[in-house]
Image (cartoon, rainbow, N blue to C red):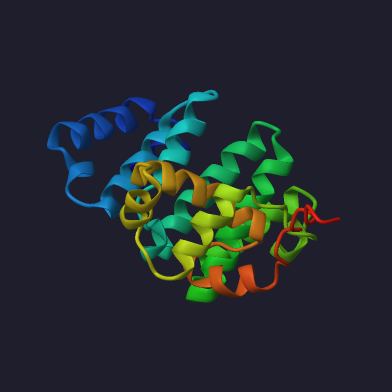
Amino acid sequence: MDLVEAAVRTGRGADAAAHLTALHQAGIAKLSPRLAMLVSGAVGLATSGPDAIGFFEQALAVDRADRWPFEMARVELAYGERLRRDRATKASRRHLAAALETFESLGAKPWAARAAAELRVTGLTSPRQTIHNPAPLTAQEREIALLAATGLSNKQIGERLFLSHRTIGAHLYQIFPKLGITSRAALRDALADIAEPDQPPSPEH
């Protein structure tokens, strides 16, 4: 991802494409989920237009991507930067804020400074400004979130709900920003802060 980003930022698109071709030919993404995330993120960096979005989302939907917080934050930052350049300001803030929080928690100061600078360009100075009130979860999202909070993997959740692990990852990718969090570790506390959905009225009434 470093080599591809360096090539893209210095206008050497052919070099970036050649590196990606080598990655695919070597089957690097098949070696581990971490490398799959980085390869998808690298492809997103080198892809122009709206097609890049799908590669960034694919990277973040990797099973238990939060096991590698620095790499995940790298992808969030690249995704946020692309969205901001494409004038999708509101959408970019969520990814930039997630990247900034992770970099700060890891003590990755140069990366945090870069994410903070990008966030300021969108009109915000703090990641906490991105979510004032958590968005409501659907019934399925809440069920997935509750299972994930117990420590179950995406595969285990999928087996219980008869869904693929990739579908579970995609749902969690939507759930985290709704709750204002960036990792599984924060799910339990975030869910505890949300009131149970209103119960339907009793037939007796």
Q: Is residue 7 above or below residue 195?
A: above
Please, which residue is most extreme toward the right here? 205
User: For this rendering, which residue is in front, 140 or 80?
Assistant: 140
Q: Residue, x 36% and y 54% (percent of image)?
A: 154
Please, which residue is most extreme toward the front here? 204
Q: Is residue 40 above or below residue 196?
A: above
Q: Quadrant of residue 20?
A: top left
Q: Is residue 52 left or right of residue 28?
A: right
- Residue 130, given in percent of the width and then of the height, sits at 74, 56
Q: Is residue 14 visible?
A: yes
Q: Is residue 60 visible?
A: no
- Residue 69, given in percent of the width and then of the height, sits at 43, 64
Q: Residue, x 33% and y 25% (percent of image)?
A: 14
Q: Is residue 190 left or right of residue 18?
A: right
- Residue 174, given in percent of the width and then of the height, sits at 57, 47
- Residue 204, given in percent of the width and then of the height, sits at 81, 56
Q: Is residue 37 above or below residue 117?
A: above
Q: Is residue 88 left or right of residue 26?
A: right
